[in-house]
Image (tube, helix red, strand yellow):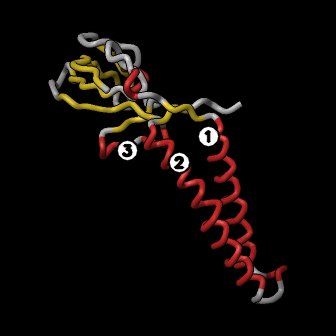
Amino acid sequence: MAEVAYFTKDGLEKLKQELQELKTTGRSNISKAIAEARDKGDLSENAEYDAAKEAQGLHEAKISQMQETLANARLLDESKIDVSKVLALSIVKIKNVKSGATMSYQLVAESEADMKSGKISVTSPIAKGLLGKSVGEIAEITVPAGKIEFEIMEVSR
């Protein structure tokens, strides 16, 4: 059974749109590539045809994976998020205890993660270390560079 994934309304909508694009335009483009390659003659020695068929297989696998993700997707009501502790979709402001540097992240589904916009996956080491913590608590998180202590400064939605 697939893992349940939690999405914001925007994230779920984006997933549905991407899936629709793959099923329509994506499939159409691959069909055209296969037809063009088939028109070039002997299929037993046609590398272009083999590549197009392989691309089709990968495309269909991606569609299947996205359909499964969508089937197991759960929409989170952002207005009902408990801000007393860090949860999925929380926006958390943390301070590195050692350096004093502060940063803010929103914990989102893996497919919505985007470091540039401050969105990290709830499955990332930092997010896992923050989950369930309250303001004022220290989270000791093991990252590739070693252990880092973060103080939870603020939790919001």
Instruction: Identify which amino acid the numbered label 2 is placed on.
Output: Leu
Answer yes or no: do the residues labelled 2 and 1 have beta carbons within 8 Å? Answer: yes
> In the shown orientation, is residue 5 left or right of residue 90?
right
| Position of 80 relative to 62 (above/below) | above
Circle 2 sits on which residue? Answer: 15
Q: Earlier in the sequence, mark 2 or mark 1?
A: 2
Name of the residue lying farthest toward the left: 100
Position of the N terminus, as image quadrant, is top right
Q: Position of residue 106 (x, y in %)?
A: 34, 32
Question: Picture quarter containing residue 100?
Answer: top left
| Position of 41 relative to 137 (above/below) | below
Q: CA distance from mark 2 to mark 1?
A: 9 Å
Q: Residue at x 49, y 46 (%)?
A: 13
Q: Residue at x 38, y 36 (%)?
A: 120
Instruction: Identify which amino acid the numbered label 3 is placed on.
Output: Asp
Q: Position of residue 45 (x, y in %)?
A: 80, 81
Instruction: Identify which amino acid the numbered label 1 is placed on.
Output: Thr
> Between 126 and 78, which is closer to the camera in this rendering?
78
Question: Picture quarter containing residue 91?
Answer: top left
Circle 1 sits on which residue? Answer: 69
Circle 3 sits on which residue? Answer: 114
